[in-house]
Structure formats: C-alpha cells, structure tokens
Amino acid sequence: MSLDQDEIPLQDQFEEVINSNDKLAIQEFLNNQNISDVAQLISDNEDYETQIISILSLHRAVSTFKILDVPEQKRIIQSLPPIKTAELLNELPADDRTAFLEELPTSVVRELIKLLNPEERKVTLSLLGYAEGSVGRLMTPDYIAVQEDWTVAEVLEEIRKEGKHMETIDVIYVTNENGEFIDDMRIREIILSKPDKIVSEIIDRRYIALHVNDSQEEANNIFKMNNRVALPVVDDNNILLGIVTIDDMLWVANEEFTENIQRIGGTEALDEPYLEMPLFKLVLKRVGWLVILFIGEMLTATAMSFFEDEIAKAVVLALFVPLIISSGGNSGSQASTLIIQAMAMGEVYVEDWWRVMRREILSGLMLGAVLGIIGFLRIEIWSHFFPEVYGQHSFFIALTVGFSLIGVVLWGTLSGSMLPLLLKKLGADPATSSAPFVATLVDVTGLIIYFSFAYVFLRGILL
C-alpha cells in the first residue's frame, strides 16, 4: 500500500526532493510549505540552509530568515553571495534587521551596512544609535500616518497606496503637519465609518505611547496592561518616530523569560543557544556564580567551627545540620522565585515591600510551624522506638529542632522575598537574587539560628 504524500514525514520529503537536484522541483516543494516548516527544515539540515534561503523567493526568504535563531542567521549571511545578502538585508523590516545586526561584532556590522541602499542604511544607523535594550532599537519606521483633517476616503486611499510596504495596517496613526503625534485609530474604526467622515471626528485623543528611550521591559508591561497589537513611539517633543508591534514584544518577553530562568538557576544569561555556545564561553558564564556561592558556603564551615564546642558536647546536634539548612534554603528559594516571577509579570513592585513582608512573615511562620511539628514528632516517635539514638533528653532536642525549623524557614522566606525587591531598588536585576544565592545566604544564618535555639533549650542539660 502506497503512502499518501501528506503522510510522509516532511524531512523524508525534503531529502527526496533535494537529492533529485532539480532546482524547480525543490523550489516548488519549498513554496508549498508553511514558513515555519521551512525554518524547521533549515534547523534540521544545516548543510542545506544556504541553498534553501537562496532558492526561495525574496519575500519568503525574508519571512523565513526573520524567525530563525541568531546562530543560523549568522551562518547563512556568512555563506550567501554579497548580492543575495544585500537583497535579503534591504528587504528585512528595519526592526528585525536591527535586532540581527546588534548580535554581530562591530566590524561585521560595518561591512553589512555598506550593502544597504542609502534609505535603509539611514534608518538602520538611526535605530542602532539608540541605547541597547531601549524601545528605539525595537521600533520600525514602517507605519501609516494621516492628518486629522483627512476624510475616511482619503485614509483608505493612503492605506491602499502604502499599506503593502508597512509592518502592519491594523492601526493608523494621526499626526499634524509637524509630525507631532495626535492619536491612533484601529482599522475597524475606519472601515465602519462613512467615506466623508473626518478623522478628527473619529479620534478621542486618549492614547498610549512609548518613549523612544523607554526600556523594552517597560514597553512589554505596557503592552500587557493595555492589550495592544502596536504602540507608537515618540521623542521628547512628541514627534512620532516609529511603532513597536506585538511580535517584537513577544520576542522581548521570550528573551527576558529565558534570561531570568538562567539567572534564577545561578548562572549568567546565555547570549547563544546552549548547544551553539563554545564550551569555554559556557564555563565562563557559569564559573563566576559558582565561585561566589562556594566562597559563601565556606562561611558555613566558619559558622560550624564557631559552635565547635557545642557540637563536641552534644554530637547529636550535628545530625540535624543538613535538615535545618536545607529547609531554610528551600523556603528561601521558593520565596525568591515567586517574587522574581511576580515582579516580572508586573504583579509586585518595590513600593509593595511592606505588603510582601507581612505576607511572608505569616507564610514563614505557618510553613515553619508545619515543618517544626513534623520534625518534633519525628524525633519523639523515633526516640520511643530507639531510645539510645537521642538519649534521655530527646524531648529538648525535639524542641530545639522544631523551633529552629520555624526560625530558619521564617528567615528564609523573608530573605528570599526581600532580596529581589532590594536589588530592584538599587537598580540591579532582581533575577540575580537566584535560588542558589538565597540558599547559600540562609545556610550560614540558619546555623546561627539553630545553635542559638540549642543553647536556649539545652543549656545545663547537654551544653
């Protein structure tokens, strides 16, 4: 029984057509695939990536190139002939071209910019002139602007004339003769209005705009809060410079999420896919935090040596050191992860520190009480069956462990929740207060809490 063509895996179909060496057949095959499928073929067939891009029509090549990972884009640009590279870069939307160029060394960018036509070169240099991580790097100058005294018929004529060259026509922007931004209109408002209606009668002059120097993180939050597909970008004089679209914001959100996850794991953010990053560079990204955490953990040994006499008198206390410090570290890691995520989602701000602290005090007490009771009962029940393990003072040892767990978990939740807010207040990235960092901090202080309770409950008994 022969298989239907649709039932054959795409990769197998590709191998069959590529082995035919029939350029027209390859071109027809690629033109019948979705852009996302073509991009996947490029990812799966590195040896053919340049050939695939070259054989596609310019429009489809650009659409595919836009969604590839940066390492793939770099390899393709390095392999393409200069003429094809020039065509591809000139056709790329300005914001996508800028996002790609800022990933390259300065010397390479200088050479590629020479391939651009004068108009695209001017736009690209303008966008690259804005600070890295700013809205200016994301915006595109491809938008439709109309005057407020235009009729709907004139607006529609402008859309027909210029729309095919624009990033989006979902939103139309209204400016005055000086280029100052006045308002924006959704395309549906125009379509549903009568042809002779004036633009000034449609707009309400209540708009949301981004500043060209705003951070991309701020822009992302504004998009989320206002449910927009595109937002205008203005300068200090309210001159409309460009627009930022939702696809750019999705890219920023994905990059930010990836960086935060990597930092929470106790490493610097990777600027390349894991498997593409050189091994030495990967080690450098990880070793810094490991050294810091190692030095921090050495303080645990220092704290242990400080209580050396107490441990010598009551060796049984050493049995619970891993339990105590791990419980505090776990609670701190939980709290820091929750707060970092809440801050990233715009649910918590620095100004909310007191509300967060109150919640974490109560949470820490309740969580610590649960663990403390379990620890107390475990020691008491165990000593009932094996009295020789903890000796005749098992009750006081159980009290020491129980109250220590309450104190350590409370301290862990407070440290984990307050540290991200403090870093944000100081202008640092909250994600650097990673779970391993909080755990290391709580390890050291947890020992102090543990032996302090031991001194209170066991003084005159074992100590």
Image: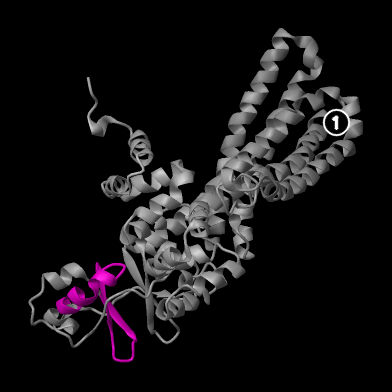
**Image location (x, y in percent) of residue 229:** 31, 63
Name the one closer to the observer, 258 or 428.
Answer: 258
* Residue at 57% from the left image edge and 37% from the top image edge: 366
Residue identified by numbered label 1: 459
Q: Is residue 219 visible?
A: no
* Residue at 22% from the left image edge and 19% from the top image edge: 1
Q: Quadrant of residue 371?
A: top right
Name the one closer to the observer, 393 or 451.
Answer: 451
Identify the amino acid type marked 1. Arg
Q: Quadrant of residue 247?
A: bottom left
* Residue at 64% from the left image edge and 65% from the top image edge: 426
**Image location (x, y in percent) of residue 430:** 59, 56
Name the one closer to the observer, 123 or 329.
Answer: 123
Q: Is residue 382 above or below residue 166?
A: above
Where does the magenta region start and end?
Answer: 156-184
Q: Quadrant of residue 446?
A: top right
Most distant residue in the front direction: 21
